[in-house]
Image: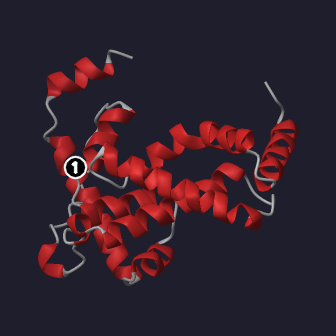
Amino acid sequence: MLSNDNRIMDYYKLVKNCLKGRPDAQRQLYDHFADTMLGVCYRYTKSTKDAEDILQEGFVKVFFSLKQYRHDGELGAWIRRIMVTTALNFLKRNRNYRDQMYFLPEHLHPVVNDGPVVMLQAKELADLIRQLPPGYQTIFNLHAIEGYSHVEIGELLGITDGTSRSQYARARALLISWLQNYPVDNKKENYGSK
């Protein structure tokens, strides 16, 4: 396995070769990050096809913007940020998602602070998150998974940070209510099948 210094050096060379227009380097960069970034894109959509479309558009932006990468942070994190921004732009311009991204009080669910103790595998939890309405799903992913602050989310989505906070709380409450009703047999069966 390569040390962190060697990986940074490899990424440096890889980026340098991509900037020279070498197709083999571009393919290597894409192949190295595509699966991970598809997972990022998939968290914001309701279909694999939409996630794949975002991934392709995102990599076009990556290759176009690669000259702006300064090697002062992890390459994967830089690419991830582009993918998240591409996913958000996709949601904003895609009518099927845009029309369902409610940030108005009349579309909000009541907030509950109870927290169940449930044993779920990551895939099951990811599947539950994907069942959230698009607005809740987007804010939950941005805050809980990507680590954006509510102020940053507000700027990205054109909403107030208070709206982001309430949407996150409501998404969390909805997930908790689903978890409380999650079939007990399914919990035991899936948890035991690692």
In percent of width and height, residue 163 lies at: 32, 79
Label 1 amino acid? Gln
Name the quarter where the C terminus is drawn. Answer: top left
In percent of width and height, residue 40 lies at: 46, 49
Residue 102: tell me if it is visible. Answer: yes
Q: Quadrant of residue 109?
A: bottom left
**Label 1: which residue?**
131
Front residue of 127/34: it is 34
Q: Quadrant of residue 90?
A: bottom left
Residue 158 placement, left or right of 149? left
In percent of width and height, residue 160 lies at: 38, 84
Q: Residues within 10 Å of mark 1 (few under 14, many from 20)?
A: some
Residue 146: tell me if it is visible. Answer: no
Position above or below: 150 against 25: below
Residue 58 placement, left or right of 182? right
Q: Secondary structure at mark 1?
A: loop
Q: Quadrant of residue 44?
A: bottom left
Residue at 51% in and 75% down = 152
Residue at 87% in and 43% down = 9
**Number of callouts:** 1
Front residue of 90/179: it is 90
Residue 27 placement, left or right of 14? left
Residue at 28% in and 49% down = 130
Position above or below: 1 against 139: above
Position above or below: 32 against 158: above
Residue at 48% in and 78% down = 151
Front residue of 78/171: it is 78
In percent of width and height, residue 1 lies at: 78, 24
